[in-house]
């Protein structure tokens, strides 16, 4: 009977030893996972800090750009009054190289070129804001 009890104690000791090893392996695995999560948390906190700083910088820049955009919209609205319909610009009688009527005095070539350049400049100026 004594041998039977010793045998049972050895089996129980072996079982408890295996169970202890399993708990140690589980504990080591959990510690590894905790360390990995802490590293991810630290990286995330650093990234969040960087993003907050960038948000402050670009938030101010964005506010400035929005303000500038609004002022440019107002300025553009002023020039919308000068918009020339494209139908007027494309009519054959409104083209720069048209013939003069008989009632208009004939100008020299230099005068015609200056006048044509002036008209082109005005049309270009207005077409910029169209």
Image (cartoon, rainbow, N blue to C red):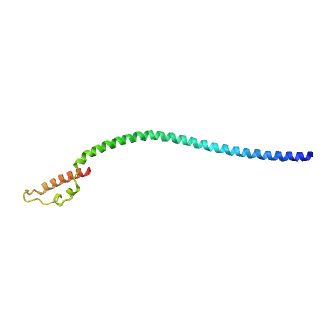
Q: Horizontally, is 29 left or right of 92 in the view?
A: right
Image position, residue 76 (x, y; %): 28, 46
Q: Quadrant of residue 112?
A: bottom left
Seen at 56% across and 42% down, the residue is 43
Q: Position of residue 40 (x, y in %)?
A: 58, 44
Q: Residue at x 51, y 41 (%)?
A: 48
Classify 61 as above or below 108.
above
Marker count (numbered): 0
x and y percentages locating residue 129 in the rendered image: 26, 49
Residue 69 placed where, x, y %? Answer: 33, 44
| Residue shown at 84% from the left, 47% from the top | 11
Residue at 55% over, 42% down = 44
**Can you name the residue that lies furthest to the front here?**
1
Q: Residue furthest right?
A: 1
């Amino acid at each position: 009977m004594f041998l039977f009890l010793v045998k049972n104690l050895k089996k129980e000791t072996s079982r408890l030893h295996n169970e202890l090893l399993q708990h140690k392996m589980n504990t080591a695995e959990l510690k590894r996972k905790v360390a990995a999560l802490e590293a991810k948390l630290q990286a995330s906190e650093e990234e969040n800090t960087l993003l907050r700083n960038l948000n402050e910088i670009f938030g101010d820049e964005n506010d400035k750009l929005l303000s500038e955009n609004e002022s440019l919209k107002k300025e553009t609205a002023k020039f919308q009054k000068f918009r020339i319909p494209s139908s007027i610009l494309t009519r054959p009688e409104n083209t720069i190289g048209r013939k003069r009527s008989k009632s208009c005095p004939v100008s020299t070539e230099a005068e015609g070129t200056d006048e044509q350049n002036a008209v082109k400049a005005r049309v270009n100026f207005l077409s910029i804001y169209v």
